[in-house]
Image (cartoon, rainbow, N blue to C red):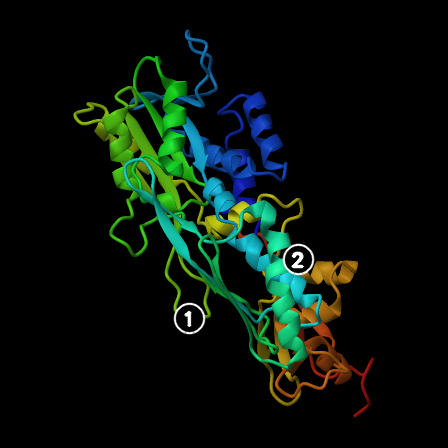
Amino acid sequence: MVDMIFSRRSIQARLNDIRGKVTDGARAELVRKLNVPNSHRLAAMWELLVIHGLRDQGELAIEEEKVTGKRPDITFNGATSFTADITTVSDDGRDEENPYDELSQEIERQKTKLGLPIGGVDVRVGSYRERAGKGERTNLKIPRRGKIREFVRERIMPSVRQQLSEDSDPIVVAIDEDEIELSVTIRRTSDGYSYGSYAAYSAPQSLDRNPLYNALKAKAKQLKSLEGVTGIIVCDGDTECLRKPGIGFQNFTAEQIIEHFLSQNSSIDFVLAVSVHEEQRHVLQIDPPERTVRAVFRTQRGLPQSPALEKTFRAMLAELPAPVCAPINGATRALEAIPKLGFHGGGSLSSGGNSVPISKLKISSRELMEVMAGDLSVERMNEMRRWKGRKENAPSKMGNPFQLMLDQGHLPTSMKVISGGEKDDDWIEIEFGPPDPAISKFV
């Protein structure tokens, strides 16, 4: 995992690039926000990427005070001129109203206290629709956030304990009431994974009651009365609104929501929406999914500056780094103080034949440093890689190659660093030689 949607190295490279293009104060403020683990971190990341993409296309001012006293995020003068605010949209509000993740996590927490293995839980919940503005919205039939712990403790766990005493497998708890509808299946043996099913409550089913429209409306108020071309750049902080709609003819697309917004707000000349899309993965797919940046650009009809604006934003988007994780994971990582895994668990082995069982071993640079520093145990490294420890009896697993080479008298003959580029890790490639008499028998 990484710290945000884009790699930390790519973010730092762009912080370096904007030096001299914006004031030192503006750059320092971006650095401050990026270093604080909270929900504003993603917004600062997107703001930096927009600024970076525009830096060489014209004159750029950040939060320049206008005669009205307002300070829009960007004032740009290049092939065309505009002022714009940047906003990052998430589904936090809908998640608060439909706390499925908290429910499943609480079930996991309380059932593991009973000695059941991690994972092996399947939580399925019902839903209902209600009118919302010019459309509908979906809500899950589960307790409110503040009632989750009590609900699991009093309504689910007594039945789990009873079925445990009866040696039932799987354990099944079902509740079907007016406001609560769910089924929980717990297996007594587990592969470490849990599953679930619920309606897409965050998919936009109303043109004017969704996170995207709400964010645009809030920015329209801030930009009102500014002279010249004004617009809004909206970025993906983990919201269904900026992705393709799921199955269901009542779901609205980002394009439809933006066009509806512009029709209702003539003071805003354009909207650019930027999101990260992840390819649909096959259930058996091993390779990581491909992630791409997707943009939606709409202007008021007949706006003379439309071609120049589109050209400017195409050039801006071309400067974006490759996304390394989905917004849902990036939003979670942005709340954490310590950067997460790099290439941990990855790498490769090259067989060398009879005299050298392993000729080359490639491993994460960060992982190796953490093991040497004592921050990562060998046992945890073995677990991540499915390597067998020295005392572990697991015929299906490969032995730890470092232990294997040491036991057979082989030492490294060379090591080199293979750069990971903008990815947040490098590789260490270790080459082994034939048995070394320093630690092996004479021949």
Residue picked out by circle 2: 366
Give the answer, above or below, for where 359 lies relative to 306.
below
The residue under the point 28% across, 41% down is 135
Looking at the image, residue 354 sits to the left or right of residue 198; the answer is right
Quadrant housing residue 428 = bottom right
The residue under the point 63% across, 49% down is 339
Residue type highlighted by circle 1 = Val
Looking at the image, residue 225 sits to the left or right of residue 8; the answer is left
Give the answer, above or below, for where 274 lies relative to 100.
above
Number of disc labels? 2
Looking at the image, residue 128 sits to the left or right of residue 403; the answer is left
Tell me residue 381's x, y (percent): 69, 68
Tell me residue 248's x, y (percent): 28, 54
Tell me residue 294's x, y (percent): 34, 46
What is the spatial separation of the Cα atoms under label 2 and label 1, in whole angstroms?
A: 30 Å
Which numbered disc covers residue 283? 1
The residue under the point 42% across, 11% down is 66
Quadrant containing the C terminus in the rendered view: bottom right
Disc 2 crowd, CA 10 A, few/some/many (<14, 14-19, 20+): some
Quadrant containing the N terminus in the rendered view: bottom right
